[in-house]
Amino acid sequence: MRKAIMVEGAAKAAGHYSHAAIANGFVYVSGQGPADPVTSIVPDGFAAQVRQTLRNVQIILMGAGADLKDVVKVNAYLSDVTRFREYNAIYQEFFASDPPARTTVGSQLFGIQVQQFSFWSGSTAFQRHGRTCSGHPRSTVPRWMAGTSMPPGA
């Protein structure tokens, strides 16, 4: 069974797709770029775009009841692979220990310098907190975000 989710407060989808889909105990996050979710403005500069993109992924994961520590695999797309070292240093700010598996490739990106896809195993996070991601598919803020149960990592 598959459940598509849209996360309130996440960057607006640029096309006809969900922010994420939950299936068979996994959450698959759609590709995220560096647009600010409030202003829709793409920051100038490579480093700012990498940080905003990773924050956008984190917002969606939190809306699905998880966080970056639950990520299993990341696919990263860079418009300029010669900036890999800079990308990697910023990536380490978000995944300081036990980083997920990752593939980073060069890609022609339209108007942005970085895009991320993240996949995480939801079964561990859900079992740890005794909850499932439930509710209306367009209103996916988990109960812990509303203050009625424990946040991830608590």
Image (cartoon, rainbow, N blue to C red):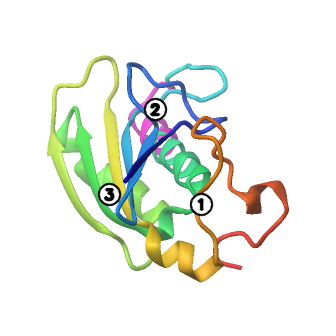
Helix, strand or loop for disc 1:
loop
Q: Report the mark closest to the observer, 3 or 1.
A: 1
Q: Residue at x 71, y 69 (%)?
A: 151
Direction right: furthest residue: 147
Q: Residue at x 24, y 41 (%)?
A: 77
Q: Report the mark closest to the observer, 2 or 3.
A: 2
Find out whether the residues at labels 2 and 1 contact each other: C-beta distance under 8 Å.
no
Count the labels in the image: 3
The answer to whether residue 42 is magenta is no
Of the 4 image quadrants, the one containing the N terminus is: bottom left
Residue of label 2? 34
Crowd around label 2: few <14 · some 14–19 · many ≥20 (10 Å):
many
Within the image, what quadrant is residue 36 found in?
top right
Mark with earlier residue (2, 3): 2
Crowd around label 1: few <14 · some 14–19 · many ≥20 (10 Å):
many
Q: How far is disc 2 from disc 1 in space, using C-alphas?
A: 22 Å
Residue of label 3? 88
Crowd around label 3: few <14 · some 14–19 · many ≥20 (10 Å):
few
Q: Bounds of the magenta span? A: 43-52
The image shows residue 109 at horizontal and vertical percentages of 24, 25
Looking at numbered disc 2 in the image, what kind of residue is underneath it?
Answer: Pro
Looking at numbered disc 1 in the image, what kind of residue is underneath it?
Answer: Gly
The image shows residue 61 at horizontal and vertical percentages of 52, 54
Relative side of 13 to 41, left or right: left
Looking at numbered disc 3 in the image, what kind of residue is underneath it?
Answer: Asn
The answer to which of 68 and 125 lies nearer the viewer is 125
Residue of label 1? 65
Helix, strand or loop for disc 2:
loop
Q: Would you place residue 79 above or below residue 128 in this image?
A: above
